[in-house]
Each structure stands twice: as C-alpha cells, then as structure tokens.
Amino acid sequence: MGISADLKFSSEGGTLQSDEGGDEYKYTYRGNYIRLPLQGIYFFGELGDKVRPKVSLGPSFGFLVGGKSKLEVNGTKTDEADSKDAFTRFDIGLNAAAGANFRIGTNKWLNTDITYYHGFSNVFEDAGEKNKKVRNRGLGINIGITFPLGTVKPD
C-alpha cells in the first residue's frame, strides 16, 4: 500500500449547444486548473517483483488559474470572456486510477497508469448558473519515475 500526492496542470472544458428561435447557440468553455490529487494506492504482488499492478482512489482538488470561454451564434463569435469570470475558483472530485509499476533499477520504477476524474462541483455556480449542472470529468495517462522517500526493504 502507499500514498500518492501529485501537482498537475489540467486544461478542462467542453461545449454546450442549443437551438432557440431558429438560432444555433454554441458555448465553448475552457478552464485551466492546478490539480492536487491525493490517492491511496494498493499494489498487487511483492515489493521485489519486476511488474506490480496497482489501483488507486482519492480526492482531487482543483484551483482555477485561467482559461477562455466563447459564445457563437449561428457560427459567428459574439462574445469571449476569461473563464475566471464565469467558473468557480475551486473544484473537488474523485480520482481513480489503474496501472502498473515496472522495475527499472534498485528502488526505482517506471510508473504508468490511466486515471479518471469525476468532479462533484458545479463549475458554473459563480456565473449564477445554479440550474445548469456542469461538472468536470477527465481521462488521463500518467507516465513517470517512482522512487522512495523513506526506508525500503532490501531486494
């Protein structure tokens, strides 16, 4: 078992479309976040194994740092705004991952996993859009090197 804490940049967003009175509205929004996922990790196998599959789960905290949003009516851009003016400044959700660590040296592993994030916060509440529930969701691939910060059992 283990604990993981990361600091990541994440660009998230989407598109909302509607037809009203014969006009086509397209709202494209993008929020840039600094994310801090904290996860409990369960490793399968033994510490000395060359490959160790793993699963992890935990909260992720997002802090809005920027982004742009735009509105198009019938294909023509009619408005553009800084996403900080429309989004909540803080987002919280659940992060889950599955992957494997591959041993590449003494106490060093190539870390790979696929993660899914599901937000709990309505990111449009600051814009008065309480009736429009929009939550961040994301799928990611992580690759990195893992090494211990404390005592490790000898191989």
Image (cartoon, rainbow, N blue to C red):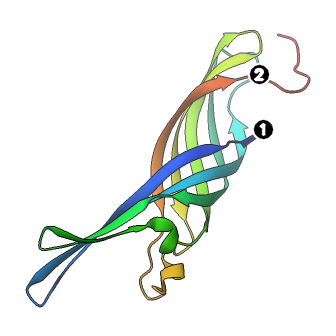
- Give the quarter of the figure containing the N terminus: top right
Q: Amino acid at mark 1?
A: Gly
| Picture quadrant where residue 144 is located | top right
- Which residue carries the number 2 mark? 47
Q: Are marks 2 and 1 in contact (CB under 8 Å)?
A: no
For this orientation, the residue located farthest to the right is 151
Give the structural element (helix, strand or loop) at label 2: loop
Foreground of the two, 152 or 66? 66
Residue 73 has which mark? none
| Quarter of the image where the C terminus is located | top right
- Residue 2 is tagged as 1
> Residue 75: image x %, image y %?
13, 68
Is residue 96 visible in the rendered structure shown here?
yes
Name the residue: 54% across, 65% down.
119
Q: Can residue 123 be seen from the camera position used here?
A: no
Residue 66 located left or right of residue 89? left
Separation (CA) of disc 2 from disc 1: 12 Å
Q: Helix, strand or loop at disc 1?
A: strand
Mark 2 belongs to which amino acid? Answer: Leu
Q: Residue at x 11, y 82 (%)?
A: 23
Between 116 and 43, the residue placed more toward the observer is 116
Residue drawn at point x = 11 percent, y = 91 percent: 21
Q: Residue at x 71, y 40 (%)?
A: 42
Percent position of residue 85, x then y? 50, 73
For the residue carrying disc 1, how many other residues have a C-alpha within 10 Å: few (<14), some (14-19), or many (20+)?
few
Of badges 2 and 1, nearer the viewer stands 1
x, y percent for residue 99: 56, 34
Q: Position of residue 41 (x, y in %)?
A: 71, 41
The answer to whether residue 53 is above or below residue 92 is above
Residue 16 lies left or right of residue 129; in this view the side is left
Q: Residues within 10 Å of mark 2 (few under 14, many from 20)?
A: some
Number of numbered discs: 2
